[in-house]
Image (cartoon, rainbow, N blue to C red):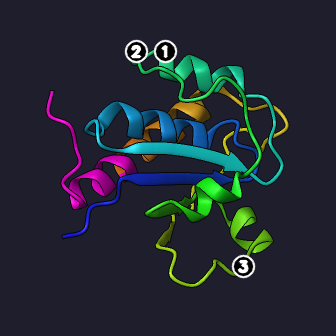
């Protein structure tokens, strides 16, 4: 089986969902996996994102949200799209790229986001990340 070594997480703002996914992938993956993330309209990483990671002693993958890096994106073995907004903004993924859509609602999209909503998103993303890494035999043993 061909194992992905580079996984890219892509969402609208790169401030919560993609940061959580990248952080948990880095945490759970064996040391052969490279992780990157980006957004189409990046914003600073939300304080709730950092807080829910700290609650589980998982380091935040990045220090700030960043724009999609096309070179890293195209060089990735697997691209994970974390929201419908991103899929709609770029409905055509270049031919031959392996991508998946994880339809995860933005917990910060509400007028008054809550830490509870971000925790629920964190827990949902952890399940997806573990399944992805297990599928390719890349889940680190502790």
Left or right of 105 in this view: 36: left
**Neighbourhood count class around disc 3 (C-alpha, 10 Å): few under 14, some 14–19, many 20 upward:** few
Quadrant of the snapshot with the C terminus: top left
**Neighbourhood count class around disc 1 (C-alpha, 10 Å): few under 14, some 14–19, many 20 upward:** few
> In the image, residue 18 lies at what x, y percent?
59, 44
Mark 1, residue position: 54
Which numbered marker is on residue 91?
3
Left or right of 112 in this view: 76: left
- Mark 2 and mark 3: span between their CA atoms? 36 Å
SS of the residue under disc 2: loop
Which numbered marker is on residue 35?
none
**Contact check, label 1 and label 2, Cβ < 8 Å:** yes
**Contact check, label 1 and label 3, Cβ < 8 Å:** no
Q: Give whichever of 113, 73 is nearer the camera.
A: 73
N-terminal of the pair, mark 1 or mark 3, is 1
Left or right of 108 in this view: 61: left
């Amino acid at each position: 089986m061909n194992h992905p070594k580079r996984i890219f997480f892509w969402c609208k703002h790169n401030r919560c969902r993609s940061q959580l996914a990248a952080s948990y992938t880095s945490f759970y993956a064996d040391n052969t996996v490279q992780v990157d993330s980006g957004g189409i309209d990046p914003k600073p990483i939300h304080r709730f994102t950092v807080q829910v990671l700290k609650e589980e002693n998982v380091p935040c993958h990045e220090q700030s949200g960043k724009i999609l890096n096309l070179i890293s994106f195209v060089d990735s073995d697997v691209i994970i799209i974390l929201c419908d907004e991103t899929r709609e903004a770029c409905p055509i993924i270049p031919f031959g790229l392996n991508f998946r859509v994880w339809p995860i609602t933005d917990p910060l999209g509400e007028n008054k986001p809550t830490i509870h909503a971000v925790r629920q998103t964190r827990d949902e993303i952890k399940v997806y990340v573990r399944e992805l890494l297990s599928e390719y035999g890349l889940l680190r043993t502790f």
